[in-house]
Image (cartoon, rainbow, N blue to C red):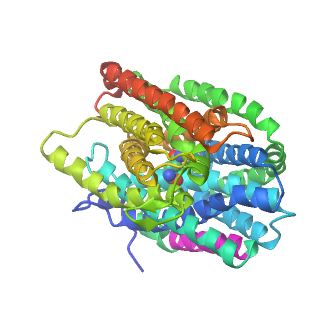
């Protein structure tokens, strides 16, 4: 039997990464396998099996994504207040497994039931495992960003494998088998978490532990579990009817903001300033994801209709490139970015977080300019260069690496410990809005059914040029705001 490690023993690790990071890495890798496996199947399943129009399927897909990331706020909040991270992750994992196997059992009839379980389950799992990574580090430990970078590679290994294998299984065997595969991934992820959870010392225990009798804590836990089951029918209805998505999005974000402002009133000035800085990053990240998440929407249609299939003399389906190149580039470049930040920090040259965020927007701006520029390589049929498109993906991935893993890390440094889960949830809530806005922007750029391929090319690339300009403007604005945000961040860089 292992001796229970103390928090200090874990945080006083030698070398680049704490070994406990690997446990979280593999649990999250398998959770993302299940998540991206399912995500990659949703739209196609809705069009080919549920017989929805492409427009409806896109809207529903956007709604599902938005709901998933919205639930992370609730999942984070309950982890902070009642369950702690471990029980939240366990509960989320169980719900996700039920969701996947519901889909595996009867994908057509129980489609939205399975999705509702997955939405609530991801809400409890996803933000809290990320927050636990932050708990492995002491305040001020400069190795934290590199740790989140490694964790982010795990996310993308899972995403790449799940996205690829699940749709392959659906094509070659059956939808039932494909959804089962996602469920098996989730079982592996949860099993790894359960086996290793005693090796992470006191990290993730309930905040109520020791503060009230066990029986009372258990009762509160049961209420959270029961409550999350009770909201399931509501989520089911909301997802099934995409016209409710708008109302939902109009309400949840402002309510979440109000709640954070309420929490801020209970804090001292320094902690309040830091939360305000976190909110600035969160708000900017909404715009970032709105650009970036064109990937699942307009860029996948652009890839389907307007790209040739050649990269360096090899033939490859442009949609495969669209779906997997981002994860592949993250896996390749995330460790390198981690090493670069460490190398720069040893020389006291590491750019601060605001600059990194600003760079993220500039990279995305350049990548959208490259998407725009593909129009100059088009043939008479309106098909253009897959190579340039792939290069644009590489550049936008570099932007993602300057923002996404760093944002995760930042939430665990800027928020006081008792609000870590909620702020991590808020970070993902920004993704929900990003996804939502991405859908609206994508719809703006789309052409009607009788447009020629060249018309489509012109319409999309015009849109991409606009996005390039907006992204650069957002980056410059953030850089201009640097002195103000720096002040709010106090000792955090
Ligand atoms: N691709 C990352 C993940 O799945 C980031 C998602 C996001 O924040 N929108 O964790």
Residue 178 is drawn in which quadrant? Answer: bottom right
Closer to the camera in the image, 308 or 353: 308
Quarter of the image with the N terminus in it? bottom left
Closer to the camera in the image, 327 or 55: 55
Q: Is residue 186 magenta?
A: yes
> Would you say 231 lies left or right of 357 here?
right
Give the main secondary structure, helix, strand or loop, of the magenta stretch.
helix
Whole-percent x, y for residue 208 in the image: 57, 49
Whole-percent x, y for residue 41 in the image: 67, 62
Single out the residue that lies furthest toward the front: 380
Q: Is residue 7 magenta?
A: no
Q: Which residues are magenta?
A: 177-194
Q: Is residue 426 visible?
A: no
Whole-percent x, y for residue 412 in the image: 42, 43
Q: Residue at x 63, y 50 (%)?
A: 123
Q: Is residue 104 visible?
A: yes
Closer to the camera in the image, 174 or 245: 174
């Amino acid at each position: 039997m292992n001796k229970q490690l103390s928090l200090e023993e874990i945080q006083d690790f030698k070398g680049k990464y704490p070994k406990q990071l690997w446990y979280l890495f593999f649990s999250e890798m398998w959770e993302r396998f299940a998540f991206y496996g399912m995500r990659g199947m949703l739209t196609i399943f809705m069009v080919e099996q549920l017989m929805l129009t492409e427009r409806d399927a896109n809207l529903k897909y956007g709604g599902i994504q938005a709901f998933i990331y919205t639930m992370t706020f609730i999942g984070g909040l309950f982890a902070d207040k009642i369950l702690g991270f471990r029980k939240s992750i366990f509960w989320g994992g169980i719900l996700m497994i039920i969701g996947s196997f519901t889909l595996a059992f009867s994908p057509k009839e129980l489609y939205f039931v399975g999705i509702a379980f997955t939405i609530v389950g991801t809400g409890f799992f996803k933000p809290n495992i990320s927050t636990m990574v932050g708990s492995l580090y002491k305040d001020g430990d400069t190795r934290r960003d590199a740790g989140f970078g490694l964790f982010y590679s795990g996310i993308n290994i899972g995403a790449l494998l799940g996205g690829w294998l699940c749709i392959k299984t659906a094509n070659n065997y059956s939808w039932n088998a494909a959804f089962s595969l996602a469920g098996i991934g989730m079982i592996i992820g949860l099993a790894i978490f359960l086996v290793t959870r005693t090796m992470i010392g006191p990290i993730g225990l309930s905040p109520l532990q020791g503060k009230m009798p066990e029986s009372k804590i258990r009762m509160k836990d049961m209420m959270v579990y029961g409550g999350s089951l009770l909201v399931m029918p509501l989520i089911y209805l909301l997802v099934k009817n995409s016209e409710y998505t708008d109302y939902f999005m109009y309400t949840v974000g402002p309510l979440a903001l109000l709640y954070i402002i309420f929490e801020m009133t209970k804090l001292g000035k320094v902690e309040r300033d830091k939360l305000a800085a976190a909110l600035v990053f969160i708000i900017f990240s909404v715009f970032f994801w709105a650009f970036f998440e064109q990937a699942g929407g307009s860029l996948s249609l652009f890839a389907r209709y307007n790209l040739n299939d050649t990269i360096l003399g090899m033939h490859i389906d442009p949609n495969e490139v669209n779906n997997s190149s981002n994860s592949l580039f993250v896996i390749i470049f995330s460790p390198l970015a981690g090493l670069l930040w460490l190398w720069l920090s040893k020389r006291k040259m590491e750019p601060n977080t605001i600059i990194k965020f600003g760079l993220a927007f500039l990279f995305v701006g350049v990548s959208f300019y490259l998407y725009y520029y593909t129009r100059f390589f088009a043939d008479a049929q309106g098909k253009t260069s897959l190579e340039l498109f792939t290069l644009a993906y590489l550049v936008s991935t570099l932007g993602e690496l300057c923002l996404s893993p760093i944002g995760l890390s930042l939430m665990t440094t800027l928020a006081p410990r008792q609000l870590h889960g909620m702020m991590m949830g808020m970070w993902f809530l920004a993704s929900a809005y990003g996804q939502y806005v991405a859908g609206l922007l994508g719809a703006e750029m789309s052409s009607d059914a009788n447009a020629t391929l060249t018309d489509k090319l012109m319409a999309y690339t015009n849109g991409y040029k606009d996005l390039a300009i907006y992204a650069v403007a957002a980056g410059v604005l953030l850089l201009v705001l640097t002195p103000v945000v720096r002040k709010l961040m106090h000792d955090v860089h």
